[in-house]
Amino acid sequence: MQSVRTDVAALVDDDPRKHAFRVHRDAYVDQGVFELEIDRFFHHGWVYAAHESQLPAAASFVSTTLGRQPVLITRGSDGQLRGFFNRCRHRGAVVCKERQGQSDNFRCPYHGWSFKGDGSLAGLPGPDGYGADFPRAEMGLVPVAELASYRGFIFVSLARPDVDLQTHLGQARVFLDRLCDQRPQGLSVVPGTTRYGFDANWKLQIENALDFYHLPVVHRSFFEIKRARGESGKMTVRDFATDQCVALERGHGTVLASDANGHVHQHLFIFPNLVILENPAPQLRVIFPQRVDRTEIEGLAFFSADAGEAERSRLLGLYERFYGPMGFGTPDDIEIFRACMNGFMAEAAPWNDFSRGYHRELDHLPNGDAAAVMACGNITDETFVRGLYRWWMNALRDVRA
Ligand code: FES
Ligand SMILES: [Fe+2]
């Protein structure tokens, strides 16, 4: 275990006059920093939990883990969405081990207490073992502090949050709206996930998901195969000259990449754990930090709810080609995460440089786009990462104060 260092303000070195921005290795390897992150962001802030299309009908559920805490999202027989700690009120076992399904009854695997989708205790074996003073009506599942949904995306705050969900999403709402407006029938998340893990810090995945600078290098084989097949598309840093990387308030961000038809694809990051990728195939990527040097990822394919069979199978093919276990994207990125963690062991060279594009950063989007942003740069710039770490540092520093 690394030494515990929690002076997070010293881990971000931002010098606007020199257009210099650095992040210290302890942000990625320090156990104390990791504990702060889990506590502040995952146990006391808004966290993405599920998509409504995964709970399509009454009596459906999704279970997940937010930080270290097990959570059960239900749509009860009354159709209402609710969130609970997935923890039996008897002696603590999780009451639902399935990831997703249809049920309005959750039977604890230990002694068989069962709970309804509205959280209430439905029954227990041998009820005569409890006296008249047993507070049965109060022994339902414990609800999370807040559950709220925006455009079908369900967010949970396990403890009372400092702001409401709309405020938390802030400037990112406009970009999430744009993504949803392109699919007016709504989004449909495909059952089944691509789940994988890697031995590296969770923030490497965030940085990487909106990083177009690495594409021609790390994913060279992907582009070479595209070229060999005669496929078109942007493949070099120069090809991305007119695309944007955008920092949004509260650590969110997006990239805006236009294709040959002028259609704009986003990789939208909602802090702290959701990336919505539109290209090369639509994917929801959910980040689960496990330890300071261990992260798990869940990838879910999604379509426009009205997509036909042919379109679904075309997109699933593209999804598998890049994100799948045998795909060209994910294994290469994971290799790089490990290379970074190994490099971070060099204690005498502790700084990562994120100054790319600082000198040419704008405080607005180009082409008259009026959406409010914190900063905008070229898509190969590190504009988003600077916004991410400014928010990260300020939010963690507040915890300590
Ligand atoms: S722990 Fe759940 S029934 Fe005993
Ligand atoms: Fe990548």
Image (cartoon, grey):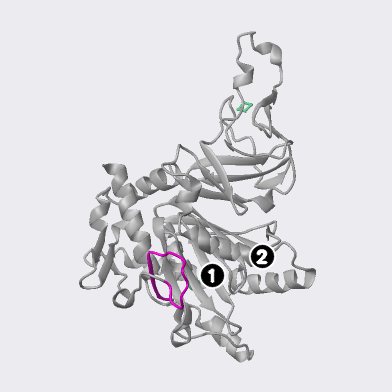
| Image position, residue 290 (x, y; %) | 46, 50
Tell me which image quadrant ligand 1 sits in: top right
| Location of residue 80 by image quarter | top right
Foreground label between 2 and 1: 2
The residue singled out by tag 1 in the image is: 266
Kindly identify the amino acid type of the residue bearing the numbered disc 1.
Gln
Residue 64 drawn in magenta: no
Q: Is residue 289 visible?
A: no
| Location of residue 147 by image quarter | top right
Residue 366 drawn in magenta: yes
* Viewer-proximal residue among 133 and 47: 47
| Image position, residue 312 (x, y; %) | 73, 69
Disc marking residue 117: none
Kindly identify the amino acid type of the residue bearing the numbered disc 2.
Arg
The residue singled out by tag 2 in the image is: 183
What is the magenta range? 365-378
